[in-house]
Image (cartoon, rainbow, N blue to C red):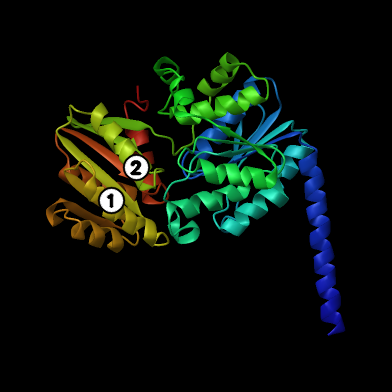
Amino acid sequence: MVILSVLFLGLLLAGVLELWAHQRKVASIPIRVHVNGTRGKSSVTRLIAAAIRAGGKRVFAKTTGTLPRMIFPDGTEYPVYRPSKANIIEQLRIFAVAAENKAEVMVIECMALQPTLQVLCELKLVRATHGVITNARADHLDVMGPDEVNVAEALLGTTPVGAKLFTCERDYVELFEAACADRGSQLELVTLAEAQQVTDEEMLQFAYVEHKDNVALALRVAASLGIPRAVALAGMHAVTPDIGALHEYALNYFGRRMVLINGFAANDPESTEIIWDIALERHKDVDRRVMIINCRSDRPDRTKQMGECVPLWAPADYYVVIGSGVYPFMRAALDAGISPSRLVYAERLSGVEIFEKLLGISSSNTMFMGICNIKGPGLELVSYFENRSTSTVIR
């Protein structure tokens, strides 16, 4: 019993010392931007880092995104090594590297989903000078739900103490104000009017499809650090997008025009429907429209939610269901009225095998759009199109 008590005290002391050492490293970095939210976290992390870098600061950034990346002050990216599953403890390693390399700024994406871990990430690991919450939408309801308002409450766990919280979320302003009051922080709300001040011409200078809310949010953070708008925008326009950013890949396959829009990273219904409508508007000339739904067996709630919502949107000619654990989508979609003849079953097929399926339902001019999840066959399919495409930029 005495030995166990000594071991426990030893482990407790080691943990306290490790946390103390980490927080010293955190404190050595004067500006710390913690980015959270349902949609756009990785994009906004990259945009803010690029804007501040253009302003002359020594910036390190880390995205969780489609593939975890650490971005150095010269813009060079390195993959974040994970010996097993994602774990918030990796943030300690990221801060250690940044502190060792004399970082002036750290822009880091929150990687926690559990509400208690989101609080821990902010209060113990990041201790932001600038908190960012992009938006709050109905996603990961199994962890943060059951409703969208609960998602907002969970995300507000990363509200900084005695600092500023920047957001484009406009539906839960009272919740955001209460969280800021509780932690003595100032709410910086980016209004719709402010987002619309980012012009279409400025948006066209991005080499991928970006959203005005994301740009306006990054501009507001940059402005709080004294970076002129033109300087910040120039930095953003040169940003390297996350692999999950909205790109399209067009290829000519023996006379057939096939366009894949990578919307796989959009995995909440609201964002996904918006992107689907944009895709239909941009490609009015196609004679066939195909939605590709990438399911994950560890995300059954999301899969079922998509199955319930997809039938309510502008229709596709076919729905190709890929990935794993596809039954909840198939069942919900059929119950909501989608004809079985329009559902194409492609569970657990590789990217190449899925492409063969797509050929079978394609016409002379077909638009495909992937949704729901990027990992696994979604990423394989994107890579397959990207390696063979004649065009990779939406304009």
x 75%, y 44%: residue: 96
Q: Residue 66, can we see it?
A: yes
The alpha-carbon separation of the residues under discs 1 and 2 comes to 10 Å
Asked whether the residues under the numbered discs 1 and 2 touch, taking CB atoms below 8 Å apart as contact, a structural biologist would say: yes
Work out whether residue 153 or residue 44 is closer to the camera in this orientation and state it. Answer: 153
Look at the image and tell me in which quarter the N terminus lies: bottom right
Q: Position of residue 79 (x, y in %)?
A: 58, 42
Which circle marks residue 309 in the picture? Answer: 1
Which label was assigned to residue 240?
Answer: none
Q: Is residue 88 visible?
A: no
The amino acid on which the numbered mark 2 sits, given as a three-letter code, is: Thr
Lateral position of residue 312 relative to residue 49, left or right? left
Name the spot of residue 393 as percent of width and height, x first.
37, 25
Kind of residue sitting beneath label 1: Cys
* Mark 1 neighbour density, 10 Å: few (under 14) some (14–19) many (20 or more): some
Task: Please tell me which residue lies in front, 217 or 383.
Answer: 217
Pick whichever of labels 1 and 2 is earlier in the sequence: 2
Left/right placement of residue 208 relative to residue 277 reads: right
Which residue is depicted at the point 60% across and 24% down? 51
Give percent across and percent down for residue 56.
69, 20
**Circle 2 residue:** 272
Quadrant of image for the C terminus: top left
Give the image location of residue 317, x and y in percent.
16, 43
